[in-house]
Image: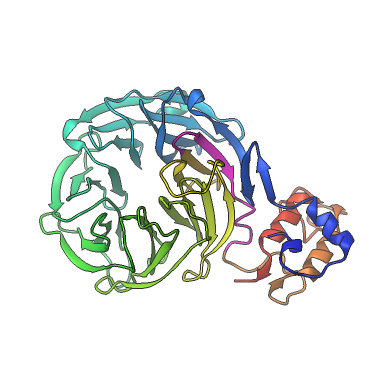
């Protein structure tokens, strides 16, 4: 956050200078801090009545595509140049595209009333997208894929249904777990105690709990462990940390603006740790974790970014409010986000606002490693480091000669200052 907001005594002139570069801004009517807008496609641009979930696809050539669920089916938008999105196609499916996931060069979409649609995007770079088939029995609220094992799961609000993707154009029934699955994350463990096991972290909706299920043998899927948390409402969705030690969980109707932290290092004994909040009343929805940061789509308050380098003490470091009307509880605004593009671009799908393409680099500056902006080596990015940067402000004497030139443009400027401010405080 800006120095002038953290009770650090600076000269008046210094504060005035910093005010010019404060990351708290309003971009096109959208309040934001440490997150900036590359581009925005409205529902009118997408010729849609509403938007729901989103996901992403990267072609073999490295080109990046946003996939957004629309009233008429999935929309495919190239965002390789995030400031200039190009609508490639909107595939009219037999029903809306509420949720979607990717396996290889296939996209699977569905909604609560079905069908399950299989879409081939192998030639998307040439503008060709093909609806391969639709399966009426594939009705589901959420689509889940374990890319390592090659299985797709239908989280239908009741049982969790497994489909084999050995033939990705013809998913076949593989098994069923008779529980309550509103959504799930399914992963294959490749090392450690659970190596070789396929594990589903099942968010059990109105049951108000997390179920951990071994789904390795599709004819004998079984409960490994389960837990709840204080005052559950509707256990909605969640995502693992990269080391699979912790799981962050959202509850959609608990009327508490919080995200729950559960220790899942022992699958047979998952343990509630704590919860965290930014203090706003907006309802939390879909969240994902990448490189030590949590990206949450929290309906009326938009995208919220939390630094979770300390996984049990996440701290909000940025946001972009796609629904500026209010921050009230409810189901208007940001439905989901996708933070897994190699470029670092993040997309957000907003129910009434359409598709937002965002730059989160300032919020995630410094990552979870050492502090690039800790010039004096005291393990804290602070006033001395700021003064060093301001002292070398301007063009570098020669390329590679500026320690404060974080973005590599051979100039120490505004972007470098914002990087330093984003890393402000103790180093991880």
Q: How many marks?
A: 0
In this view of the protein, can residue 197 be seen by the observer? no
Left or right: where does residue 85 sit relative to residue 226?
right
> Does residue 266 sit above or below 250 in this rendering?
below
Question: At 20% from the left edge and 35% from the top edge, which residue is drawn?
Answer: 170
Left or right: where does residue 401 sit relative to residue 155?
right
Question: x and y percent of residue 145 in the render?
Answer: 30, 48
Residue 352 part of the magenta segment: yes
Which residues lie in the magenta part? Answer: 350-367
Q: Main secondary structure of the magenta part?
A: loop
The residue lying furthest to the bottom in this view is: 378
Question: At 51% from the left edge and 62% from the top edge, which residue is drawn?
Answer: 292
Question: At 47% from the left edge and 34% from the top edge, which residue is drawn?
Answer: 352
Image quarter where the C terminus lies is bottom right
Question: x and y percent of residue 106 in the render?
Answer: 33, 36
- Looking at the rendering, which quadrant does residue 111 occupy? top left
> Does residue 161 sit above or below 68 in this rendering?
below
Question: At 20% from the left edge and 54% from the top edge, which residue is drawn?
Answer: 180
Residue 299 part of the magenta segment: no
């Amino acid at each position: 956050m800006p120095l002038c907001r953290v009770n650090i005594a600076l000269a008046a002139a210094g504060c005035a200078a910093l005010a010019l570069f404060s990351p708290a801004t309003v971009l096109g009517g959208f309040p934001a801090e440490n997150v900036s807008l590359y581009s925005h496609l409205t529902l009118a641009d997408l010729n849609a009545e509403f938007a729901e979930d989103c996901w992403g696809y990267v072609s073999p050539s490295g080109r990046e595509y946003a996939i957004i669920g629309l009233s008429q089916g999935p929309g495919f938008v190239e965002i390789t140049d995030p400031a200039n999105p190009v609508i490639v196609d909107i595939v009219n499916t037999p029903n809306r595209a509420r949720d979607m996931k990717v396996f290889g060069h296939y996209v699977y979409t569905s909604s609560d009333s079905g069908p399950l649609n299989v879409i081939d995007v192998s030639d998307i770079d040439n503008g060709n997208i093909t609806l391969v088939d639709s399966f009426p029995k594939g009705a589901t609220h959420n689509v889940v894929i374990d890319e390592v094992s090659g299985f797709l799961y239908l989280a239908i609000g009741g049982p969790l249904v497994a489909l084999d993707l050995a033939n990705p154009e013809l998913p076949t029934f593989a098994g069923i777990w008779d529980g309550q699955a509103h959504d799930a994350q399914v992963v294959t463990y490749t090392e450690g105690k659970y190596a070789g096991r396929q594990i589903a972290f099942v968010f059990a909706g109105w049951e108000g709990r997390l179920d951990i299920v071994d789904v390795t043998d599709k004819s004998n899927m079984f409960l490994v462990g389960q837990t709840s948390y204080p005052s559950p409402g509707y256990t909605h969705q969640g995502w693992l940390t990269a080391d699979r030690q912790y799981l962050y969980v959202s509850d959609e109707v608990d009327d508490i603006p919080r995200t729950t932290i559960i220790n899942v290092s022992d699958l047979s004994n998952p343990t509630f740790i704590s919860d965290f909040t930014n203090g706003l009343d907006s309802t939390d929805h879909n969240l994902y974790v990448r490189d030590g940061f949590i990206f949450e789509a929290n309906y009326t308050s938009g995208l919220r970014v939390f630094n979770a380098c300390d996984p049990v003490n996440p701290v909000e470091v940025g946001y972009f409010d796609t629904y500026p009307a209010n921050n009230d509880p409810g189901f208007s605004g940001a439905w989901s986000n996708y933070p897994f593009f190699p470029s670092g671009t993040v997309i957000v799908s907003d129910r009434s606002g359409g598709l937002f393409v965002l730059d989160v680099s300032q919020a995630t500056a410094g990552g979870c490693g050492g502090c690039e902006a800790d010039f004096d080596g005291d393990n804290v990015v602070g006033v001395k480091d700021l003064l060093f940067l301001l002292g070398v402000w301007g063009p570098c004497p020669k390329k590679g000669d500026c320690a404060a030139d974080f973005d590599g443009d051979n100039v120490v400027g505004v972007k470098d200052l914002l990087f330093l401010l984003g890393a402000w405080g103790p180093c991880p």
